[in-house]
Image (spheres, coloured by chain):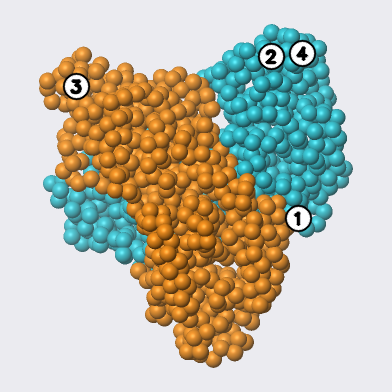
Chain colours: A cyan, B orange
Amino acid sequence: MANAIRALTMDAVQAANSGHPGAPMGMAECAVALWGGMLQHNPADPKWSNRDRFVLSNGHGSMLIYSLLHLTGYPLSIDDLKGFRQLHSKTPGHPEVDITPGVETTTGPLGQGIANAVGMALAEKLLAQEFNRGNQAIVDHHTYVFLGDGCMMEGVSHEACALAGAWKLNKLICVYDDNGISIDGQVAPWYIDDVNQRFAAYGWNVIGPVDGHDVAAMQAALAQAQASTEKPTLIRAKTVIGQGSPNRAGTAKAHGEALGAEEIKLTREQLGWTHEPFVIPASVYADWDAKKAGAKAQEKWQKLFDAYAKKHPELAAAYQRRMAGELPETYAKLVADLLADTDAKAETVATRKASQQALEAFTAALPELLGGSADLTGSNLTNTKSTPALRFDGAAPNGGRHINYGVREFGMAAIMNGVALHGGYIPYGGTFLTFSDYSRNAIRMAALMKRRVVHVFTHDSIGLGEDGPTHQSIEHAASLRLIPNLDVWRPADTAETAMAWAAAIARQDGPAALLLSRQNLPYAPKADLSVIARGAYVLAEPKEVGLRKKAQAVIVATGSEVQWALHAQQQLATEGIAVRVVSMPSTSVFDRQDAKYKAAVLPKGLPRVAIEAGVTEGWWKYGVDAVIGLDRYGESAPGGVLFKHFGFTAENVAATVKAVLKQKR
Amino acid sequence: MANAIRALTMDAVQAANSGHPGAPMGMAECAVALWGGMLQHNPADPKWSNRDRFVLSNGHGSMLIYSLLHLTGYPLSIDDLKGFRQLHSKTPGHPEVDITPGVETTTGPLGQGIANAVGMALAEKLLAQEFNRGNQAIVDHHTYVFLGDGCMMEGVSHEACALAGAWKLNKLICVYDDNGISIDGQVAPWYIDDVNQRFAAYGWNVIGPVDGHDVAAMQAALAQAQASTEKPTLIRAKTVIGQGSPNRAGTAKAHGEALGAEEIKLTREQLGWTHEPFVIPASVYADWDAKKAGAKAQEKWQKLFDAYAKKHPELAAAYQRRMAGELPETYAKLVADLLADTDAKAETVATRKASQQALEAFTAALPELLGGSADLTGSNLTNTKSTPALRFDGAAPNGGRHINYGVREFGMAAIMNGVALHGGYIPYGGTFLTFSDYSRNAIRMAALMKRRVVHVFTHDSIGLGEDGPTHQSIEHAASLRLIPNLDVWRPADTAETAMAWAAAIARQDGPAALLLSRQNLPYAPKADLSVIARGAYVLAEPKEVGLRKKAQAVIVATGSEVQWALHAQQQLATEGIAVRVVSMPSTSVFDRQDAKYKAAVLPKGLPRVAIEAGVTEGWWKYGVDAVIGLDRYGESAPGGVLFKHFGFTAENVAATVKAVLKQKR
C-alpha cells in the first residue's frame, strides 16, 4: 500500500519533471496508518460535514494526498494524476481547496496548514458544544495534520500550536515528519529544537519518536492520540525523506526534484514494485478502497442526524444552514434596519466604535459570528454583549464567542481561515491595521481560497496619533487593495461601517478587511443608504452646499478624510466653485461595478482630486489630477496635530482643487 | 533609583495623556539591576562601537528607556521627557533609532526587538571571531533585551530564539518581564507556554523565575547569565505590571493609559516619592550617573584598540571602515568592471543566477557582506565561493559567511535588521518573492530605520511555473513598492541585476529588495550601462529596429517582460510603427530622479503601454494608456505556458500598442 504512493509520486513528478517526491515517499507508511482504515471519511461525498479533516501542512508533498485521494476512491482519476502540475488539472503543484475533491485547505506557504488545522479543530469543538445533545454527537470528528520541519520552524506554528494547547484541542492529531532534512540539507546546524519539550511547553501530548515506517507503531500512536481527552497530540514520526530511493533517500536531493528515469528504475527494483508507471494492481486498489467503509460511516451518521433532527428540528436546521454557509432569511431586513438606525442617529463616533455597534446587531442575530482579537479587544472593539469571552477552563468550552488570540496576528488569521474552511462559523478578528503586515500571507490565502473571513483593522492611518510611525499605517490600505479577491473597506461613518459589515458577512466567496479609525468621525448625511454597497457613491452634490450649478470637479475621499472633502466643498462653495464629493469606502467593490455606474459617479472630463491619509499610488488609476496623501512615514504626536502637519485639511483640499482647475483651464 | 523611573514614567505619560506606564513601572528594578552599573556604555558617546547593546523589545514601555537614558547622562534632557509623544520631540511614542541617542533599534511591533537583538549578538560574535587577535578583544560586548509576554507570543520570537540557540549566542541576555498580564487581561486563558521548557528546547540557558523586584536577585541572575559560555540566557523575572500604583498594579489597566492625577498622587504616596512632577533629586541623579564610569570604560577600550591598531593596522582600519558603514575606495571600479563584464558576456541566464554572479564579485571584494537564505540557498543562489556556510559547531564560529536561516523568513529579516543596526556587516538574505509577505513588517522596519539590508526575492511572478498560485507573486512587486524608503529592483538581465546589487550595497540610508526570475532571461544590449542606476532608461529606440522615425509610443517594462517589449517593438517595426522601449528596473529609484530626466525617458504626449506580470495598479501613476498585467491569481503549470495563457506575449503587447494608438488618433 505504501509503495503504491511511492510509485505514483515518482511517476507523476517524473512526468511533470517538477515536484517534490521526498515527503510523500517518506510519509507513505504514516499515510497507510491513518488513511488505511482509521480516517473517518467518505470518498463519494467529500463534503460530508462530519468527516475527519486532513491537512497536509507540508503542501509541497501534494502527491501524497493526490495518491491517497485517488487510491481510496475519490473522483480523482489516474489521468488526473498524469496531469500533475499542468494547466487547469485537478492536481496542481500544491493542494488547492475546491480544485481537488478531498483537499480541505490550500497549503504550501509553510506553517499555515497546521494553523488552519487548529482552526478546524476549534470549529469542531465549538460546534460540538453548541449542537450535540445528550448522546447525539452529530459533530464528532478529528482533525489530522501531516507537517514537516519547515512548518515547525515557521513562527506561525508557534502561535497556532500554543493556542491549541491553551484551548485543549484534544481532537487535533499531528504527525510530524521528523526526517532531519530541509532544502538546505541536514537541519542540525540551524534547527535544534527539542520538539518534545517545545510541545510539552504548549500543553500538548507528545508521542514518540516513533518509527514512521512502521505502520503498526504509527497506528498505535494514532490510537493513543485519539484517547487524549484534554490535549492536542503531536506524534513525532522518525522517517527517511525519499524512502525507497537507493541514492536519494535521506538527502535534500530527494526533496524537490524528479528522481530521474534511472533512479526511478533503481527505486522500483529496491521496492520490488514491478508495475508500469501509473499502473496500480487491482489488489492494491482493493486494499486502499475506502468507498464502502466511507458510505457506511456516513450512513450511520446520517441515521444519527435524522434522529437528532426529529428531536431538535430547529437545531438541525440551524446546523445545516450554517454548514452551508447561508445566512438566515431575516438578514436583509436586519441590514436595512441597522442602516436606517445609523442614519437616524447620525452619531459622531470612531468607526471602530461604529463597527462594534454594527456587530452588536449582527452578533445578536447570527450565532455563527465568532469574534476575536490579537490582544487588542478593548481597542479593536470586536467584542459585543452577545459574544462573551470564550474559555476552555472546564470540560467543555464555556459557550463564549469572542476569542482572545493573544499577541498572535498571523496565527489568528490562519486559524480563522481554518474555522472558515471547516464551516459552521464566520470568523472575524481584530488587530491594528499596521500589523496586517504580520498576517498578510494568511489574508492572501483566504482570498485565494475564496473563504469568508473578516479582518477588523483598527487604528488606521496617522489618525492613531502618539504611538508613532511603527504603528501608523501608511501603505497598508493601498497594499491590501492589491490582494486579488480581498474586499477592502475604509468607511467614513456609522452607516458606511454598517454597510461594510453587512457586505463582508454576506460575501460568500472571499474575505474582507475593514479599516477603521481610532478617532471620532462625523456622520455624513446621505440621500440613499443602499448605494454605499456599490463601494463608492456621490455623497454630496454642489446643491447640498447651496450651489445651483453643476460640479466643476470631483473630490474623492475615504474614511477619516471624507470630512475634509465635505468641508472643502463648503469652502469652495463660498467662492462659487462647485464640486461633487464622492465617498469611496471600497475601491475593490467599486471596481466591480458596471461601467455605467462608474461613469455616473466619476463623470468623464471632470477634474478629480483624491484625498486619503496614506500612500498616493493607488489613486492614479481613477484618472485623478492630484492626490493628497502621504508617501512617507508618520510621526509620533496627537492625531489632530498630524493631520494638520501633513496637509489633511479642508484648506489644503480646497487649494488643491483650485490649482487643478486653474491648470486645466 | 527604581522609583525615579516610576515617577518619570507616570509624569510623562500623564503629561502626554498617552502612553504605557505598566512595563516601565514593572521593570524598574530589572532596569536598576542592569543599568545601575552592569551595562557597559558611555552616555557621552552613544555610538561607541564596543558598547553593550540594549533592546527594549516591549517598545511600548518607551518611558523606561527614556528615563534610563536621561538618568544615566545621555543628551536627553528633562524637557525632552516633557515632550514625550509630541511632534518632533526626541521622545516619540515608541523608541526610534537615530531619533533618541542611546536607542539601538526602533521597537513597538512586538517580537521584532528580540529578533533584532539576536542579529546584534550574532554580529558581535562574528566580528569578534573576525577581528579579535590574541588577548586583544576589541569586539567584546553583550546584547541585553527586555521583553514581555507579547514578544513571547509572537511567532517571530520563536524563529529568532531558535536560531540564537543553534548559534550558541552566549552573550545574548534576555530579561523576560513575566507579569502574566497582556492588554486583554490575565494571560492564562490564551498563553500557557511553559517558558522555561520552551527555551530549554531551543538550547537556551534559563534562569528563574526570579523576583523581578529584587535588585540583588536580578543582579545575581545577570551575573550568572554573563558566565554562560555556550548558550543564550533567558532570565524569567516575575514582576507586577504597574508596580507602585495602588489601584492599577497587576491589572491590564496599568498597561496602556495614563494613571490619572488621583492615582499618581496615591502612587507617589505609596512609593514615598515626594518630589514634584519631573523633579529628580540630585542624589538620585548621582546614583544613576554613568558618565564617569562610561568614559573610563571607553577609555580603557580605546587604549586596547590603539595597541591593537599598532599591531594590526590593516585590521583596525577595516574594522573602523566597516563599523562606519563605508565601502572601500575600490568599490566604484569594482562595479564598473562587473557591469562591463556582464555587457561583454551578454549572457542569457535567470536573474537569480545573474545575482549570484554579481555576488561572486561583491562577496570576494567585500568581507562585510553576510549572506543567507531561509532554507532556499540552492534556489535563491545567495551563496558564493567566498561565502561558505556559517557554522557554530566548535568553540568559535567557523568563519563562514552564508547563513542557513532555516524556514524562518520573518526571523531572518528581523535578524538582518539587527545585524545592520549593530554595524560591521551588510546583511542580505533570500526567500521566494511571495514569502516576502511573511517578513513584510521587518522589511518595513528596515525602511523606517533607514538601514542597509538587502532582500533577495527570487522566483518572482508566474514565471516560477508549476508551484502554482500559493507561490506565484502577483501583487508583491507592486506591494513592496508601496513601502516608503524601500528600493525595489526588478532587473531584466545580467547588467541590470549587477547594477541593482551595486546600488543596494552602496545605499547607506535604506534597504533594497531585488526581485529575480527563476527562469532564464535574454540579455538586452545597452548603449549606456551607467544609466541603469537611474531606475529607468531608454533601452531601445526605433532606430535599433531599423526605423528612422521618432517613436510614436513608449512601452515600459520590467524584469522578465522586457523581452516581450523588445519583441513587440520589432513586430511593430515591420508594420512601420515606431516605438521606444523603456526598461524600468526600479520605480522607486526612477521616482527620485529630476523632472528633466523623467521627461526625457517618458516624453510628454507619447502614448504609453506598460507590461509587467503582476497587478496593474501601480502603473497608472506613470500616465500609461494601457497596462498588460495580471489582476488575479496564477495557475499551476509550466511558466512558459502561463505567460502565453495570461497574454504576456509580444503579439499581445504589439496589439495593445496599436489599440492605444488607434484610440488616441
Element under disc 4: loop
From the viewer's side, name the closer residue of B417 and B81: B417
Q: Quadrant of residue B343?
A: top left
Residue A392: which numbered mark, if any? 1
Left or right of B344, for residue A221: right
* Residue B494 percent across, percent down from the top left: 34, 30
How far apart in space, not on screen, are marks 1 and 2 (Cα)? Answer: 53 Å
Judging from the image, mark 4 belongs to the subunit labelled: A
Q: Which residue is mark 2?
A: A266
Q: Looking at the image, is mark 4 or mark 2 earlier in the sequence?
A: 2
Residue type at tag 1: Phe
From the viewer's side, name the closer residue of B427 and B398: B398
Q: Looking at the image, is mark 1 or mark 4 earlier in the sequence?
A: 4
Left or right of B485, for residue B439: right
For the point 36% across and 45% down, the residue is: B505
Residue type at tag 4: Gly
Q: Which residue is mark 4?
A: A272
Figure label count:
4
Residue A203 vertical position relative to residue B384 in the rendered view, above or below:
below
The answer as to whether the residues below labels 1 and 2 share one chain is yes
Mark 1 residue crowding within 10 angstroms, few (<14) / some (14–19) / many (20+) = some
Judging from the image, mark 1 belongs to the subunit labelled: A
For the point 28% across and 26% down, the residue is: B344
Q: Which residue is mark 3?
A: B544
* Residue B122 percent across, percent down from the top left: 53, 53
Element under disc 2: helix
Residue type at tag 2: Leu
For the point 27% across and 31% down, the residue is: B340
Can you name the residue that lies furthest to the right here?
A135
* Label 4–label 2 contact, CB within 8 A: no
* Label 3–label 2 contact, CB within 8 A: no
